[in-house]
Image (tube, coloured by chain):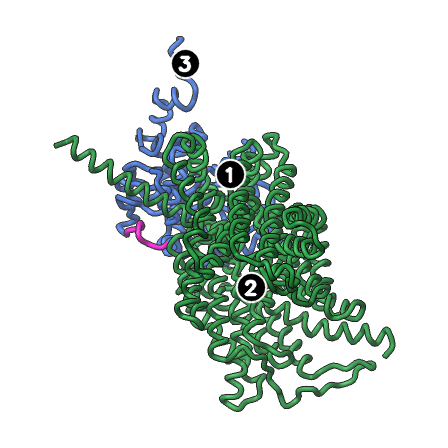
Amino acid sequence: MLEIDRIDVFYGDLQALWGVSLTVQDGEIAALVGSNGAGKSTLLKTISGLLRVTRGSIRFNGLQLDKTPAYQIVELGVCMVHEGRRLFPEMTVLENLEMGAFNAKARKSKNEMTAWVYQTFPRLKDRRNQTAGTLSGGEQQMLAIGRALMSQPSILLMDEVSLGLAPILVRHIYDVVKEINRSKQITIFLVEQNVRLALEIADSGYIIETGSIVGHDKADLLLHSDRVKESYLGFGQMEREK
Amino acid sequence: MSFVESIGQSLIYGILVGALYGLAASGLSLVFGVMRYLNVAHGALLMIGTYLAFSVSSFFHIDPFLSIPMVMFLLFLIGMFLYKLMFSSLAKYPVGMRIDNSLLISFGLMLVLESLATIIWSPDERNITTPYSGMTFGFLGLRIPYVGLFGVALTTVLIFALHLFLNKTYFGKSIKAASQDWESALTVGINIERTYFFSFAIGIALAGAAGSILSFSYAFSPAISEGWSIKALIVITLAGLGRIGGVFAAGLVLGVIEAVSVYFIGASYQQVVGLVLFILILMFRPHGLFTRKGGGASSSAENLPSSGYAFSQRISISEGWSFNALKEAITQKRFFIIGILIAACCLLPLVIKSDYLINFFILLFLYISITQSWNILGGYTGQISIGQSAFFGIGALSTRLLWMSGVPIFLALLAGGVSAVVLAAMIGLPSLRLRGVSFAIGTLGLAIITGVIVHNVFPGVSFLPAKYLASFTLTPRYYVALVLMLVTIGAAYLLVNSRLGLGMIAVKEDEAAAAATGINTFKCKVLALAVSTFLAGLAGGVYAFYSAVYYYFVPFELIWSFEPVLIVIIGGAGTIIGPILGAVGYVALKELFTVTIGQFSAPIFAILFIITVLSLPGGLVEATGKIRNWVGSYKIKKGGMQNVT
């Protein structure tokens, strides 16, 4: 269980997160939705140790993450898929996957994990000796997820997986994400601008606005709430006119 | 010897020295590729390697070649120590700031190592004689020295081992991964701190290997540091910055070109040919010789914000200074203070009768001028040139020659400025094609070329003729330097507050975005280059007017290129006041140390310099801004309290 308790995060003098608290239960898919610049990516980067909290705490299965170095956070089972893929562009697909299994624990079962990632994304197997920079956008996103899975995470943090992909690919990738969640019991915490998509596949949802959590509920309830419809799905105007 | 044999022999020597270039540059490339640290002390560490090889082999009475593993190990340890001591704290900054600050502190480190080596081992040249020194064997009529051959063989083995390590081991691959995307490396669980630590130490160990192999074939002294740093920088630029592969080949290419050119035009222009070719190659292949086109070039240094990030934080401060200053200057006390300062400078020679102090102020004004002139191009327009010495030098040369031939000094000074612009039009304009670090190294190449040419054409000393010497007094020179400084600061101020100045700042922040919003970026860069070089040429002219006796090549020395860069960055690039503060602090401290502690002044000054940079990564101006903020918030707090009570 991931517990975030009243954290404040700053970029220099600018405060980006204001007392954010949330909980992600084991085995669920939780979605964090909000508009551009609301602090979604900041929150994920803070959980994975790339940014540090000024106040508050982050715990994962009782272990404190907010003072742990980033590479140890991965060993504890928390792994992030960066926004915009962020692969190692001049390394091959296989090498990228190997890098995903960098920590000692994951390295032992590297081969089984690679086989499983190939099974999940057969396209990656075809392209295994190609450098990552030459893959298409969809393939890169698959590799980014595959690389994160290689570290054998208990929770996967996913930042804007749908960004810049064709709708059909987005659908496919989210089907795979659901499948990973169900078959491997990997908890998913995803961040999306595409509010409808995220809330459709998630179990629970949080809404973030200008650095603060402003709403939390079961995902389907949130999806049909007036607040979400009005602010994110553009139904407010129509319904008022009715 | 026939023509073919001579060429063949040159080729052999080229390969022998080129292999060393390649090995030395591989270490630098590893450090730059992984961390984006531009370690200009690399040559100094190589120089330490030569002396350690000397000490180890003579202390243990062993074959010099056996000392190599030991030297590598020692330099590995030194690398670890230096990383922990100085370089680790830069890892938390974005790329542009890493390049700037690593350049500064490693420059300081180079000074420290050079002067320490001079103190310990004396400045004299030495060489190591091996039992087989001088022995050669014949091959197709060519002579191949055994020592050189062993050197090349060893170098090849080391390079091969490095490639195996980087491509085949898990840890090596993690180093490559970190060089391609360090944030991403963190998220897959790579311990980036440890990766940096070991890459740095390995890079330094490779410098040690190159140094010890070099010491068996060539003479060495503490003064070789700068030359080897520059060679290594050129080789990694040639190979494509940030790429570890291809460096060895680029080193061989440079070595062979240099050696063969000796045959055609003689040894005195050997360096020039290599550099001219280097610049030409850079023009046509700005991303380096051995880079593939397309294919995920996203990690190459050119695509990273070269300096933009570091500077963009400073720009807010600069706007505060310049725009407010513009308004306030007329009405407010700042105008008053500036007036008083200028008046004080004007009255100074009437009050102070000490020649020493007047000399000091002339030097200070010269430094402020050349620094401010560089600031227009480097600080405001973001084109980090290391070629200012060429323009300063050509200004000095033209002014001196014209003045000596009877032209009135003010006309001669003007001609000095113009000659610098002409030189800029000839060689500077093409270099504007280059971006980021490539531009910096390219302009450094130009500065070396002009220096070597002038050294060869005017090897002697320039004396003032008796009729001038008889009337030589310091006071007019003081006023000329003062006017030069005021003109330079005034020109910089007016320029950066004009529309053109805004365009220049936009070019620095993001050249592509500036072009897309309709700014003629090339025009901005050209004008910045013209104004900057004109002022540098004027400053050179004043130097020529001020100095009674000097070697013609002295104003071309690279220190005139490096010091303005250091001073501007440490003062605060892209501000008017920063370079002035920086120059005052730099010149005053340097002078103070030379006067008070003599021989040890250089290392102590350099250590102080490093500490300053490490504690003020954003420059002096940012530090004053911080203090002002801090005082401001304190006042508010205090005010708030009073309101409550």
**Residue lying furthest top in this view?**
A242
Which range of residues does the magenta coloring cover? Answer: A64-69
Disc 3 to disc 1: CB gap under 8 Å: no
Q: Main secondary structure of the magenta part?
A: loop
B536 or B509: which is nearer to us?
B536
Q: Amino acid at mark 3?
A: Gln
- Label 3 sits on residue: A237
- Label 1 sits on residue: B493
Give the quadrant of residue B80: bottom left
Q: Is residue B152 above or below residue B480?
A: below
At a point 35% along the width and 43% down the height, the residue shown is A27
Of circles 1 and 2, the one toward us is 1
The local secondary structure at tag 1 comes to: helix
- How far apart in space, not on screen, are marks 3 and 2 (Cα)? 62 Å
At a point 55% along the width and 72% down the height, the residue shown is B46
Disc 1 to disc 2: CB gap under 8 Å: no
Query: x, y percentage for residue B353?
Result: 43, 58
The chain containing the residue under callout 3 comes to A
- How far apart in space, not on screen, are marks 1 and 2 (Cα)? 38 Å
Give the quadrant of residue A107: bottom left
The chain containing the residue under callout 1 comes to B
Task: Identify the chain drawn in blue.
Answer: A
Which shade of the palette goes to chain B? green
